[in-house]
Image (cartoon, grey):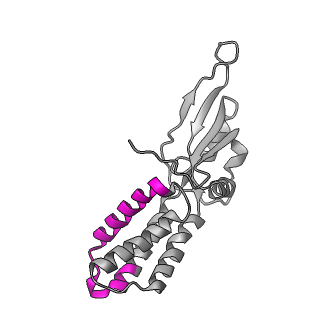
């Protein structure tokens, strides 16, 4: 795509399988199963940016009681991963984990919970879903090359509206034969042993 932002070069992880036709013989065109986030598009920067800002908001709010940055990040990560069990990939999970992190730290250090800080954390962390999202360098060219040889099937987890928006923003829909998005409702889609 001319003029489009492109993320750094990376190795693509694609699962390719040959599909049986109804007659039991192998078809000529294989199936390539791809993921969206972290495979076709770069997205971590949006979360990393939010983490820096939210950590600073919490540090300012707690003042002299502010713990080491790595403690804040570890607590937020633990809360966010724990919330995956109940919230799945809902778009409010990440922002809410920051509010819960601030609340836990404020309580731990005997500080009053400031609703303005909670709202600010929701706003800043909520922007992580706005991107920008850009394809990895060469991703669209590989998808185009695969077209005659493979049925290109995207399987991704997350909020249906957000995942579709990412697909449209980077222009990958043109190169995909099918898209499956899991985690569409309020039911969690992540399972743990």
Q: Position of residue 161 (x, y in %)?
A: 66, 57
**Can you say which quadrant of the picture contains the C terminus?**
top left
Seen in the picture, residue 93 relative to 22 is either above or below; the reply is below
Q: Is residue 76 magenta?
A: yes
Q: Position of residue 151 (x, y in %)?
A: 67, 32
Asked whether residue 119 appears in the rendered view, the answer is: yes
Asked whether residue 131 appears in the rendered view, the answer is: no
Q: Nearer the viewer, residue 175 or 127?
A: 127
Q: Residue at x 38, y 63 (%)?
A: 79
Q: Residue furthest right?
A: 174
* Residue 166 lies in quadrant: bottom right
Q: Residue at x 52, y 58 (%)?
A: 43
Magenta-highlighted stretch: main secondary structure? helix
- Image: magenta residue range: 58-86
Residue 99 as seen in the image, left or right of residue 141: left
Question: What is the tally of numbered marks visible in this picture?
Answer: 0
Q: Residue at x 70, y 12 (%)?
A: 23
Residue 168 as seen in the image, left or right of residue 115: right
Q: Is residue 73 magenta?
A: yes
* Residue 52 lies in quadrant: bottom left
Q: Nearer the viewer, residue 65 or 168?
A: 65
* Residue 31 lies in quadrant: top right
Residue 97 as seen in the image, left or right of residue 71: right
Q: Position of residue 2 (x, y in %)?
A: 69, 56
Seen in the picture, residue 17 relative to 180 is either above or below; the reply is above
């Amino acid at each position: 795509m001319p003029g489009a932002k492109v993320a750094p070069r990376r190795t693509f992880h694609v699962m390719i399988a040959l599909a049986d036709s109804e007659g039991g013989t192998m078809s000529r065109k294989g199936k390539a199963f791809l993921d969206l986030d972290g495979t076709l598009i770069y997205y971590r920067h949006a979360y990393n940016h939010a983490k820096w800002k939210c950590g600073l908001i919490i540090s300012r709010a707690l003042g002299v009681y502010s713990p080491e940055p790595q403690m804040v990040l570890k607590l937020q990560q633990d809360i966010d991963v724990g919330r995956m069990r109940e919230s799945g990939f809902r778009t409010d999970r990440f922002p809410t984990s920051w509010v819960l992190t601030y609340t836990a730290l404020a309580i731990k250090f005997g500080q009053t919970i400031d609703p303005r800080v909670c709202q600010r954390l929701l706003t800043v962390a909520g922007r992580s879903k706005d991107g920008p999202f850009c394809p990895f360098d060469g991703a669209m060219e590989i998808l185009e090359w695969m077209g005659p040889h493979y049925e290109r099937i995207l399987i991704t987890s997350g909020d249906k509206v957000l995942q579709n928006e990412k697909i449209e923003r980077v222009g990958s829909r043109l190169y995909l034969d099918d898209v499956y998005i899991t985690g569409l409702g309020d039911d969690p889609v992540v399972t743990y042993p």
